[in-house]
Amino acid sequence: MEVWPAIDLRGGCCVRLAQGDYQRETVYDADPAAVARRFVDEGAQHLHLVDLDGARDGRPANLAALRAILAAVSIPCELGGGVRSEETIRELLELGLSRLVIGTLAVDEPDWFRQMCRQFPGQLVLGIDARDGLVATRGWLDTSKLEATELAGQFADLPLAAIIYTDIATDGMLAGPNVSAMAAMQRAVNVPVVASGGVTSATDVAQLAAIPMAGCIIGKALYEGRLTVRDALAAAG
């Protein structure tokens, strides 16, 4: 199972939100590129980047920080947040990102998303963020009536790089992942599913690896010293 340390960007800094709440922010580092280098030094082979300003505003907003990270490391990096046009997709891929996460527009404009997946095969990730099993969009500010597994099934025939499934209730809470929800999503589709939200310990990582999930994203636990990249990689097998 792949391990994806997370770097969430807001105002050019490395931050974390509790349950996606922009009013519950903790700033961990003013130099996201240094954080990226540290994760790589600990063995990271992938990085999951999130433009929180972009997720809220609908367009990339932390390009300087992204460029600095991509210049600092040579491992594959993916980005979510504010990816809502073909122009943005091209711009970000040309910047050097390996794959991009799209969530809101997959819900709002499914035909467009299908077209983009076929146009950029293996480079787009379907980001499904859920609250109580229902899809949330626009930086988690809105919750729809659409079941997360139903959304995944609508796009399972596309050349997706992966599906990232985030359980908002557990994200940033250091209380463990929603293992049953993650397992249900992985069973629902024949697409690699990456678990996100609440991964706090090596035991959590091992539980997700046993499902098996294709990968897991780890954020706050790394910044709070609850887990190291090395220990997560060992637990992931």
Image: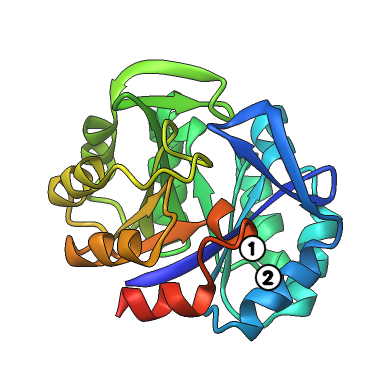
Tell me the element at label 2. loop
In the rendered image, the vertical position of residue 147 relative to residue 25, given as above or below: above
Mark drawn on residue 96: 2
Tell me the element at label 1. helix
Q: Specify few, some or many for label 2: CA neighbours under 10 Å numbering under 14, 14-19, or 20 or more.
A: some
The percent position of residue 220, horizontal first and vertical second, equals 58, 52
Check the picture and name the quadrant holding the N terminus: bottom left
The percent position of residue 161, horizontal first and vertical second, equals 38, 61
Residue at image x 38%, y 43%?
A: 114
Identify the residue under disc 1.
93
Q: How is the image coloured?
A: rainbow
User: As rendered, which of 113 and 70 lies closer to the eye?
Assistant: 70
Going by the numbered disc 2, the residue's amino acid type is Gly
> How many labels, in total?
2
Q: Are marks 1 and 2 in contact (CB under 8 Å)?
A: yes
Left or right: 211 in relation to 208: left
Q: Specify few, some or many for label 1: CA neighbours under 10 Å numbering under 14, 14-19, or 20 or more.
A: some
Q: Can you tell which quarter of the image residue 200 is in?
A: bottom left
The percent position of residue 120, horizontal first and vertical second, equals 47, 59
Asked whether residue 30 is in view, the answer is yes
Residue at image x 19%, y 43%?
A: 180
